[in-house]
Amino acid sequence: MALYCIGDVQGCDAALQRLLDLIGFSPSRDTAFLLGDLVNRGPDSAAVLRRCMAHEGALRCLLGNHDLHLLATAHGARKPSRRDTLAAVLQADDRDGLLDWLRRQPLAIAHEHGGETLLMLHAGALPAWTAADLLRLADEVHAVLRGDALPAFLHQMYGNQPDHWQEALTGTDRLRVIVNALTRLRFCSPDGVMDFESTENAGSAPPGLMPWFDVPGRRTAGTLLAFGHWSTLGYMSRPDLLALDTGCVWGGQLSAVRFGATLAERELLQVQCPQAQAPG
């Protein structure tokens, strides 16, 4: 049985098929974790969702910001963007089944491999959070997304405030901070104040900010975190970090990492992708 992580697919189902063929993926034997942003900007979001549903258990999926945007658009909480490519999902005969499956996917997953923990999320972890905190808080949002309060929450989910974590936060403010960190975060201050303006590479941090994973004293340091979301960062592999958004939808690559007997043993596998949209 092989274990993989796969970066942002964003509706590029043909590229996902080519990547699965390249790695020799067997749903009966292997497990691949898709690190969020399954949909949008690419040409075939509905096919990506159907593929993941058909192989649920072998293809295990996280929610990213584009996946939440699809749910919000479907529930009238967000207007479609001119760059969205979600119509095939929203107008599909199996729309309700696709959306119901999507809302039941988690925002974070911990997986044990070779006696170590692999912690997966779409975007980032606030420096004050331990791995246990992150999983607990992700579960708080997951409970809302799969429950009856989903439509009301989606109408209140968007916004940049509060911009930092406090355990005393309650209600929508609490959930919004968790969602923003797990699905939108790139840069923050050393004390965990989030920035949502800059989307450039890690070396272009605005004054007073740094990539979330470089904050001194980050409490998830020492646990391997795998994430996507940040295409301008590209592929990055450190002992406790694995970044896998390599810009498939922008004409980059769709990337997978195959782990060996331990999480330190990593093989990068990629397919080149046709450009579905131009950045910007």
Image (cartoon, rainbow, N blue to C red):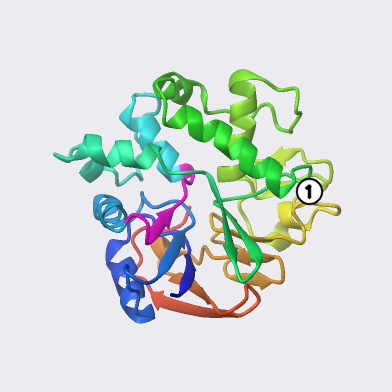
Element class at badge 1: loop
Quadrant of the rendered image containing residue 146: top left
- Image coordinates of residue 200 in percent, x first then y, are 63, 56
Q: Is residue 90 visible?
A: no
Q: Residues within 10 Å of mark 1 (few under 14, many from 20)?
A: many
Location of residue 199 with respect to 195 vertically, above or below: below
- Image coordinates of residue 225 in percent, x first then y, are 64, 59
Residue under the point 83% across and 41% down: 191
Mark 1: amino acid: Leu
Q: Is residue 61 magenta?
A: yes
Location of residue 65 with respect to 255 vertically, above or below: above
Q: In the rendered view of the protein, which quadrant contains the N terminus? A: bottom left
Residue under the point 39% across and 76% down: 272
* Left or right of 25 in this view: 34: right
Q: Principal SS element in the magenta part? A: loop
* Left or right of 91 in this view: 250: right
Quadrant of the rendered image containing residue 251: bottom left
Q: Which residues are magenta?
A: 56-65
Residue under the point 47% across and 50% down: 62
- Image coordinates of residue 3 in percent, x first then y, are 48, 71
- Nearest the eye: 89 or 231: 89
Residue under the point 33% across and 54% down: 56
- Image coordinates of residue 86 in percent, x first then y, are 29, 43
Instruction: Find disc 1 in the rendering and name its residue.
Output: 209
Q: Is residue 169 magenta?
A: no
